[in-house]
Structures are given as C-alpha cells and as structure tokens.
C-alpha cells in the first residue's frame, strides 16, 4: 500500500503530465502549411513551457519541504532497511542501531539538551564490576 507521500507525488506527476495537453490539444485543431501551424503553436508552446517550469519548481519545493518536515516515510524505510541489514550482518549491534532513539528519549525525559552528549551507559569497567 503506497504511503501518503507517494500518493501525493503521483498526483503531482499526473498534473504535470497533463501540461502536455496544453500544446497537443491546440495542435490537433491547427491545419494548413507547416509554417502556419508552427506559428499558431508558438503561444501554446510558451504557455506550456511556463506551466511545466512552474510545476517543476513547485514539485522541487514540495520535495524539499517534505524532507525537512520529518514526515519523509520513504527515507525512514530506507534507513530502517539498512539498519536491519547491518544488524543481520553483525556490522552494528542492536544498541548501536537504537542509540539515537535512546538518546532522544533520554533528552526528552531529563529535559537536558546538554545531557545529549553524555554517555547513556556507564563505562564498561563499571558494568563488568556490576555483573560480578
């Protein structure tokens, strides 16, 4: 099932594809020598160019804002897939994969942003002593 972002992206692509009709529909009704047809299409071609460029810029702005909003679910799915693959290959530990999440929870719980740089766990020598 596509996410909402994919659905919106598909709708934007459909709207930009419809801009093709701005030149195609008038071209169907223009008949005569090539020079007259070409002259008649100039205005529609310019309008089509402007609409396409405006649509492209709007799409770029939408994608940029989406990437900055934190709602980019596609990006998060890719990140999650990479983390799962790295854990399965034993290249990172589960704690390493979840460190950012644990740190964010720690900062949220304590309310101390300066504590974000503090270690989440005591040094390994302290942990080993506690295990004995």
Image (spheres, rainbow, N blue to C red):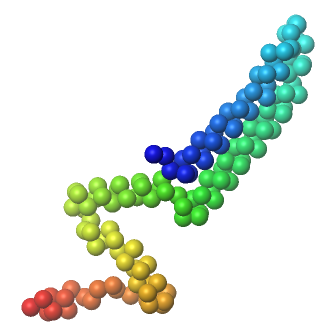
Image quarter (top left, top right, bottom left or bottom right) of the N terminus: top left
Residue 112 in sight in this render: yes
Q: Is residue 53 left or right of residue 35?
A: left
In the figure, 90 relative to 9: above or below? below
Residue 125 in sight in this render: no
- Residue found 81% across the figure and 18% down from its top: 27
Image quarter (top left, top right, bottom left or bottom right) of the C terminus: bottom left
In the figure, 62 relative to 51: above or below? below
Question: x, y percentage for residue 54?
Answer: 76, 44
Question: x, y percentage for residue 45?
Answer: 82, 28
Question: x, y percentage for residue 46?
Answer: 84, 32
Q: Is residue 118 left or right of residue 96?
A: right
- Residue found 88% across the figure and 7% down from its top: 32
Quadrant housing residue 127:
bottom left
Quadrant housing residue 130:
bottom left
In the figure, 31 relative to 25: above or below? above
- Residue found 27% across the figure and 69% down from its top: 94
């Amino acid at each position: 099932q596509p996410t909402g972002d994919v659905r919106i992206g598909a709708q934007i692509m459909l709207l930009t594809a419809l801009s093709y009709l701005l030149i195609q529909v008038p071209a169907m009704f223009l008949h005569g020598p090539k020079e007259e047809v070409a002259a008649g299409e100039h205005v529609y071609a310019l309008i089509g160019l402007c609409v396409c460029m405006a649509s492209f810029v709007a799409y770029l702005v939408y994608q940029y804002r989406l990437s900055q909003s934190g709602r980019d679910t596609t990006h998060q799915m890719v990140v999650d897939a990479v983390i799962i693959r790295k854990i399965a290959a034993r290249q990172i530990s589960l704690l390493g994969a979840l460190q950012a999440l644990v740190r964010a929870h720690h900062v949220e719980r304590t309310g101390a942003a300066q504590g974000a740089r503090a270690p989440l766990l005591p040094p390994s020598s302290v942990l080993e002593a506690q295990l004995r």
